[in-house]
């Protein structure tokens, strides 16, 4: 029980400074997008989809490895800074717990089904299927990755995964 509570607290704290999942009325979004997209989103070009997939692949590999420094390179600047500021205050034991949470956030076998971009807002999103942790096991899931354009680069703003039950 204490372990579960510790993991839940760790997940909450980690997510509080690395992402802000959309919690609005999801009935207005296509069923495969877990994160909200701007209304003027259009289909991505093949080259943009490939670029976003590559960024997410590097972001996800850094998560799998528990490599915070590498992981932060692919997040939006605000979240990367907040993450760095929190991590430097943690004990070695707490940092080890956070690393495990980061590793458990990584998805497996992500396959893109859709890519949308909103040039007016500088957001883009990938949606697809893969596997994510649900109740301690990897299960088939639908996922979305929301990107924000910062300067000339796309950065991950948030990811969201829902199990396919």
Image (cartoon, helix red, strand yellow):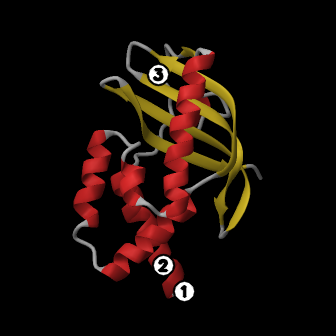
The residue under label 1 is: 1
In this rendered view, identify the residue nearer to me: 62 or 123. 62
Contact, CB < 8 Å: mark 2 with mark 1? yes
The residue under label 3 is: 38
Q: In this view, does 154 lie above or below 94?
A: above
Q: What is the spatial separation of the Cα atoms under label 1 and label 3, in whole angstroms?
A: 41 Å
Q: Which of the two discs, 1 and 3, labels the residue nearer the N terminus?
A: 1
Within 10 Å of disc 3 (Cα), the crowding (few <14, some 14-19, many 20+) is some
Residue under the image location 41 percent in, 76 percent down: 96
Q: Where is residue 119 in the image (x, y as percent from the top left)?
A: 43, 14
Within 10 Å of disc 2 (Cα), the crowding (few <14, some 14-19, many 20+) is few
Residue under the image location 55 percent in, 52 percent down: 61
The residue under label 2 is: 5
Q: Which of the two discs, 3 and 2, labels the residue nearer the N terminus?
A: 2
User: Regarding mark 3 in the picture, which secondary structure is present there?
Assistant: loop
User: Regarding mark 2 in the picture, which secondary structure is present there?
Assistant: helix
């Amino acid at each position: 029980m204490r372990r579960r509570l510790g993991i839940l607290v760790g997940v909450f704290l980690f997510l509080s400074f690395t992402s802000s999942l959309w919690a609005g009325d999801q009935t207005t979004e296509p069923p495969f997008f877990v994160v909200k997209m701007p209304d003027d989103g259009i289909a991505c070009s093949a080259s943009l989809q490939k670029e976003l997939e590559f960024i997410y692949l590097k972001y996800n590999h850094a998560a799998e490895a528990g490599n915070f420094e590498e992981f932060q390179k692919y997040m939006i600047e605000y979240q990367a800074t907040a993450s760095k500021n929190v991590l430097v205050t943690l004990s070695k034991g707490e940092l080890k717990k956070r690393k495990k949470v980061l590793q458990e956030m990584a998805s497996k076998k992500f396959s893109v089904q859709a890519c949308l971009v909103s040039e007016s807002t500088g957001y883009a999103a990938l949606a697809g299927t893969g596997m994510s942790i649900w109740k301690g096991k990897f299960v088939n899931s639908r996922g979305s990755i929301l990107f924000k354009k910062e300067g000339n680069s796309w950065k991950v703003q948030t990811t969201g995964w829902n199990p396919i039950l």
